[in-house]
Amino acid sequence: MKAIFGRKLGMTQMFDEEGKVIPITILEVLPATVVQEKHKEKDGYEAVQVGMETLKKEKKSQKGKPFRLLREVRGKAEEELPHKGDALDVSLFEEGDEVEVAGISKGKGFQGAVKRWGFSGRNASHGVKHEHRTLGSVGSQFPQRVIKGRKMPGHMGAARVTVRNLKVVKIDSESQSIALRGAVPGSRGTLVEIRGI
């Protein structure tokens, strides 16, 4: 299992061998320790619990797990999981590897159907008044109610998003940072999970 956690530092750009500009996202990898193993026989699934950012003072409720952040990583079928006490860092990956990154996307609050779902809106003329960005009809005459799952205005963003097939461009083991080609979900400082494909 190849999985690490990091914080998004921001985006920049660099040049490849051909002189083309490529957009990159820089992530600061958090040193993590495996604190618990979960097995199919006992827990019903294979996973490991990972702890990050050690606390100076351990609370009673955190006995044996003195970490500010605890996250669980599920293992895929026939995948060897790390054992309790193992350290996870940037050395798990190499330049050129393809990864998938999961994180919480930027919250955009309550949005209309045009922004949230890409609706085209109404005509800009011919008697259309004050309705340019409305969603229009929300159903038929029967069954006299709005069908579940209808695309309507509502809360947008602030949800878990996974971006696949991102390439590892550069690894800096000294500063424990990793540069990925393309964009990663979330704003600066967002905690993201980086997994090998």
Image (cartoon, rainbow, N blue to C red):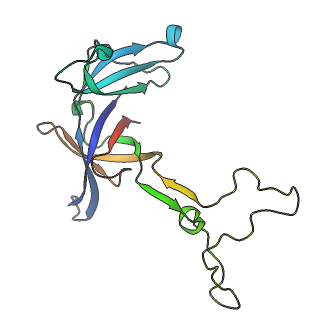
Q: Quadrant of the C terminus?
A: top left
Q: Position of residue 33 (x, y in %)?
A: 26, 21
The vertical placement of 28 against 75, above or below, is below
162 or 105: which is nearer to us? 105
Q: Residue furthest right?
A: 142
Q: Position of residue 108 (x, y in %)?
A: 45, 58
Residue drawn 70% across the image and 56% down it: 150
Q: Is residue 4 left or right of residue 19?
A: right
**Camera-nearest residue between 41 and 52:** 52
Asked which quadrant contains residue 20, the reply is bottom left
The residue depicted at 64 percent of the width and 72 percent of the height is 134
Relative vertical location of residue 143 with respect to residue 113 in this rendering, above or below: above
Q: Is residue 69 above or below residue 113?
A: above
Q: So how many labels did they put on this image? A: 0
Q: What is the quadrant of residue 175 in the picture?
A: top left
Q: Residue furthest bottom?
A: 126
**Picture quarter with the N terminus:** top left
Residue 26, compared with residue 36, is above or below; it is below
Depth check, front residue: 11 or 125: 125
> Residue shown at 47%/46% (left/top)?
159
- Relative horizontal placement of residue 109, taking residue 37 as reference (left or right): right
Q: Residue at x 62, y 86 (%)?
A: 124
Coordinates of residue 128 in the picture (x, y in percent): 68, 86
Tell me: 3 left or right of 155.
Answer: left
Q: Is residue 7 left or right of residue 195?
A: left
Residue positioned most to the front: 60
Picture quadrant where residue 97 is located: top left
Farthest top residue in view: 41
